[in-house]
Image (cartoon, rainbow, N blue to C red):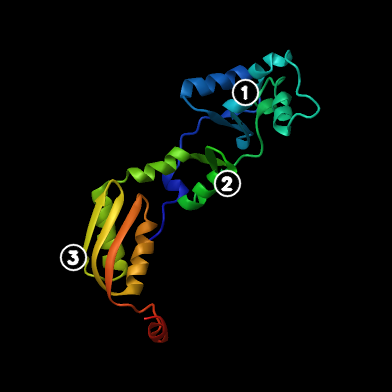
Amino acid sequence: MREPTVSSLMTREVITADVESTFKDVVQLLEDNGISAVPVLDGGYPVGVVSEADLLPKEEFRGGTADAPGLFAGRDAKHRWDKVSGLTARDVMTSPVRKVSPGAGASAAARELAEAGVRRLFVMDDDGALVGVLSRRDLLKLYLRDDDDLRTTIRDEVFGRTLWVDPDTVDVVVTDGVVSLQGRLERQSEIDIADHLVRSLPGVVDLQNRLRPVWNDTVHPRQTEIFG
């Protein structure tokens, strides 16, 4: 069972700015569209991103009339000061663009968002063209999956097609994304596989696995003699 790809989750209609867009035009874009950042294009290709954080230094330092960061100020403060005199998107944007491939898995995208500490990734094809944007919210929508749909997938895909187990021998209950499994399978290894597959399904919040094996094929007979 394949996990969802970035292409299946991303927002395809992306609001963009040009490198020569004025400071005020960028602010207006964010306001009009209810977004917090916009990719900056140069010749149709993303070269940076302007976020609310990139625009605020102009107010933070009162257009350059406030004192500049001191000699021992952190790098971040000095970086913000550099944006104070910016007049265009090119002047204030952050580069490079945090990007992801349309074919990347949802888990890889979530890891990139977490490790980079950003709210969104811009989706770019092999030629570097912008084809979409993937936000944290897009990924979290996976957990809005209908309980009945999730239960059907577990019964038919996990037990029926993957493990070749009669789904009627397993009691599957899904409540608010929390899955409960009860019943008996022939081998412990089947239970371990089922546990892994169910936990990795998009939309599963947690798993309460109460399946029991007829026999434990994961323990070597010698181990049973020593530790049993």
Disc 2 marks a residue whose amino acid type is: Glu
Q: Measuring 33% from the left and 73% from the top, which residue is drawn there?
A: 188
Q: Position of residue 223 (x, y in %)?
A: 42, 83
Q: Measuring 39% from the left and 63% from the top, which residue is drawn there?
A: 196
Q: What residue is disc 2 on?
A: 115
- Which is nearer the N-term, disc 3 or disc 2? 2
| Mark 1–mark 2 distance (CA, rounded to whole Å) | 24 Å
| Mark 1–mark 3 distance (CA, rounded to whole Å) | 58 Å
Quarter of the figure with residue 16? top right
Give the SS element for disc 1.
helix
Give the SS element for disc 3.
helix
Residue 105 visible in the shown view: no
In which quadrant will I find the C terminus?
bottom left
Q: Measuring 64% from the left and 17% from the top, which residue is drawn there?
A: 59
| Mark 3–mark 2 distance (CA, rounded to whole Å) | 42 Å
Q: What residue is disc 3 on?
A: 168
Disc 3 marks a residue whose amino acid type is: Asp
Q: What residue is disc 1 on?
A: 55
Give the SS element for disc 2.
helix
Q: Is residue 1 above or below residue 90?
A: below
Q: Extreme front residue here?
A: 227
Q: Nearer the viewer, mark 1 or mark 2?
A: 2
Disc 1 marks a residue whose amino acid type is: Leu
Q: Measuring 19% from the left and 67% from the top, which residue is drawn there?
A: 169
In which quadrant will I find the N terminus?
bottom left
